[in-house]
Image (cartoon, rainbow, N blue to C red):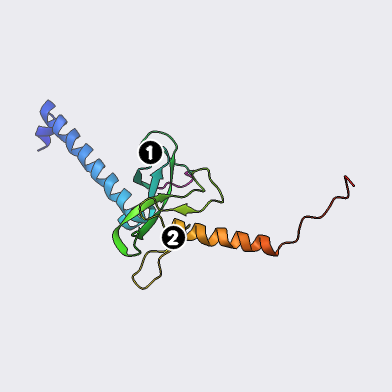
Amino acid sequence: MPELLKTPGGKMLGAAFAIIAIATVVVVIKRSFVSPEVTAANTRDFVDSATGKAFKSEIQPGEDIPIRAPSGGNTGYPAELCYWTADGHVKDTPTYVLMNEYAGKPGQPTFCPDCHRLVVGHNPRASANRKPPPTEAEYNARHSNSNKSDNKNSAPPPETGRGR
């Protein structure tokens, strides 16, 4: 065997074996520090605000939001998942929702583009024994009525004393 390593072919074979051994050691060490569970925990759902398409990305320490999206820009925002249907039933596959807060509409409620139901930050998962969130129409009807009743009970604006 030592004579084989002295030949040009043997030296190449030895070098290839050494490279494979080093690569194996690097992979084993890396996997011992980063478990599949950690990788799974750091993989999050995002929505590309430029295209509206959902994608997954592994978040990195110190990474800023928005993240780089598949469209190429820094337009990736955390997605909220909606598991409701328009008729208030639970579905298996979520709709990935971009919150209005990230879409440049702060203070405006966000509704699922699929079922048109209210979506909130840290949106709770749908359940058959949970009442579904209001639809956009239900939400708007409630809030327009509460605004009217608020106006009925408010005092008229104070007079400034000018113009008399």
Which contiguous range is marked in magenta? 59-63
Establish if 19 lies above or below 79: above
Q: According to the image, label 2 marks what residue?
A: 123
Give 10 or 91, whichever is nearer the viewer: 91
Relative image position of residue 13 (x, y in whole percent): 14, 33
* Prevailing SS of the magenta stretch: loop
Q: Residue furthest front?
A: 164
Establish if 93 lies above or below 1: below
When asked about the image quadrant of residue 129, the answer is: bottom left
Residue 35 visible? The answer is no
Establish if 21 lies above or below 82: above
Relative image position of residue 135 (x, y in whole percent): 43, 59
Mark 2, Cα crowd under 10 Å, few <14 / some 14-19 / many 20+, is: few
Does the magenta segment cover residue 40? no
When asked about the image quadrant of residue 88, the answer is: bottom left
Please, what is the three-letter code of the amino acid marked with disc 1? Thr
Give 158 or 48, whichever is nearer the viewer: 158
Q: According to the image, label 1 marks what residue?
A: 51
SS of the residue under disc 2: loop
On screen, residue 104 versus residue 10, left or right, reads right
